[in-house]
Image (cartoon, helix red, strand yellow):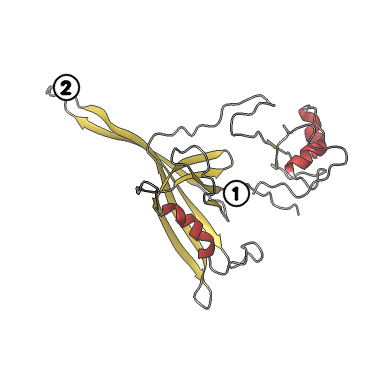
C-alpha cells in the first residue's frame, strides 16, 4: 500500500509590530496536527441614521475601520507519538508555546501589547493578534498528566485583509513569497514529470531540491517544485529524504 501523502505543517510565527517580518529570536510553533478548517470573518463598523426627511430613508455610514478575524482549532497529543514529541509526557509541554501568543508583552517604553502573530499554512497567510484561546484537555495519564488537548483560537487584524490567491505568474518568475508546485498524477515518475515540463533542468536536480526518495513512483497528488536551479544537482545527485510537505 502506498504511504499516505505528507502535508505541509501549519506554523505560528511571532512577527514585528508592523506585521511585516518575523521577529529575530521570536517564538515559532510548528503545529502537531493541521487544522481541519479555517474560518475567516469580515466585519465593518456601521452606523444607521435617519436623513431628517420623513419621506427619506435611513443612511448607513462607516464609523470605524473594518476587522478581519481568523478562527482555527489545533490538536496536540503525546499519548501515541513515541519519538516524535521530543520526550514530552505532558501535552502542555507542546501547547505552552501557542499560549505564549495570548500573553501581553511589556515593551521598552513600558507599553503593554500582545505579540504580533503570523499564521502560515502553505499559500495561506494571516497576520494579526491573538484575541482568544481556549484549551480543552481530552485525555489524562494515570498520574494525572494531560496527554491530549485541543486549542481553539482566534486572531484579529484591525482592517479588511485581502486573502485572495496570488496572481498567476509564468514559470521561472513566481509571485513574491510563493513557490509554484505541480501535483503528480497516478503512476507518474519524476523523470516523466520533469521531461514533460520542458524546463531544461535534470530530474536529479528536482529530486534533490524536493528531497524525493523514490523518483520512479510519485504518490498521486504529491506536490513537486519543478522550477529549481539547473545546477542544483547532477547525474550523481542523491535524495536525502522523502518529500517534505509537512
Q: Nearer the viewer, mark 2 or mark 1?
A: 1
> To which quarter of the image does residue 70 belong?
top left
Is 135 above or below relative to 235?
A: below
Q: Secondary structure at mark 1?
A: loop
Could you classify mark 2 by the number of other residues whose Cα lies within 10 Å: few (under 14), some (14-19), or many (20 or more)?
A: few
Could you classify mark 1 by the number of other residues whose Cα lies within 10 Å: few (under 14), some (14-19), or many (20 or more)?
A: some
In the displayed orientation, state which residue is furthest to the bottom: 143
Percent from the top left, x then y, of residue 136?
A: 45, 62
How many numbered markers are drawn?
2
Percent from the top left, x then y, of residue 102?
A: 41, 53
Specify which label sits upstream in the sequence, 2 or 1: 1
Residue, x 73% and y 34% (percent of image)?
Answer: 226
> To which quarter of the image does residue 42 belong?
top left
Residue, x 59% and y 41% (percent of image)?
Answer: 122
Q: Secondary structure at mark 2?
A: loop
Image check: 43 left or right of 32?
Answer: left
Percent from the top left, x then y, of residue 192?
A: 81, 35
Is 233 above or below relative to 96?
A: above
In the displayed orientation, state which residue is furthest to the right: 236
Image check: 171 left or right of 168?
Answer: right
- Residue with the mark numbered 1: 9
Q: Which mark is residue 118?
A: none
Is 164 above or below relative to 223?
A: above
Inter-mark Cα distance, 2 to 1: 55 Å
Q: Nearer the viewer, residue 41 or 131?
A: 131
- Residue with the mark numbered 2: 56
Amino acid at each position: 500500500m502506498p504511504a499516505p501523502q505528507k502535508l505541509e505543517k501549519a506554523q505560528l510565527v511571532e512577527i514585528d509590530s508592523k506585521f511585516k517580518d518575523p521577529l529575530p529570536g521570536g517564538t515559532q510553533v510548528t503545529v502537531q496536527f493541521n487544522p481541519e478548517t479555517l474560518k475567516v470573518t469580515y466585519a465593518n463598523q456601521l452606523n444607521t441614521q435617519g436623513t431628517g426627511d420623513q419621506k427619506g430613508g435611513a443612511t448607513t455610514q462607516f464609523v470605524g475601520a473594518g476587522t478581519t478575524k481568523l478562527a482555527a482549532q489545533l490538536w496536540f497529543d503525546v499519548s501515541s507519538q513515541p519519538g516524535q514529541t521530543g520526550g514530552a509526557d505532558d501535552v502542555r509541554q507542546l501547547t505552552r508555546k501557542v499560549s505564549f501568543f495570548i500573553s501581553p508583552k511589556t515593551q521598552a517604553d513600558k507599553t503593554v501589547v500582545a505579540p504580533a502573530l503570523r499564521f502560515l499554512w502553505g499559500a495561506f497567510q494571516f497576520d494579526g493578534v491573538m484575541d482568544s484561546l481556549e484549551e480543552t484537555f481530552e485525555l489524562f495519564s494515570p498520574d494525572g498528566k494531560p496527554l491530549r488537548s485541543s486549542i481553539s483560537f482566534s486572531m484579529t487584524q484591525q482592517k479588511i485583509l485581502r486573502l485572495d490567491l496570488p496572481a498567476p505568474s509564468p514559470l521561472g518568475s513566481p509571485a513574491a513569497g510563493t513557490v509554484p508546485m505541480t501535483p503528480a498524477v497516478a503512476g507518474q515518475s519524476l523523470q516523466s514529470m520533469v521531461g514533460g515540463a520542458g524546463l531544461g533542468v535534470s530530474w536529479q536536480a528536482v529530486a534533490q531540491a524536493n528531497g524525493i526518495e523514490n523518483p520512479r513512483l510519485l504518490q498521486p497528488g504529491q506536490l513537486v517544485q519543478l522550477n529549481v536551479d539547473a545546477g542544483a544537482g547532477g547525474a550523481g545527485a542523491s535524495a536525502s529524504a522523502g518529500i517534505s510537505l509537512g
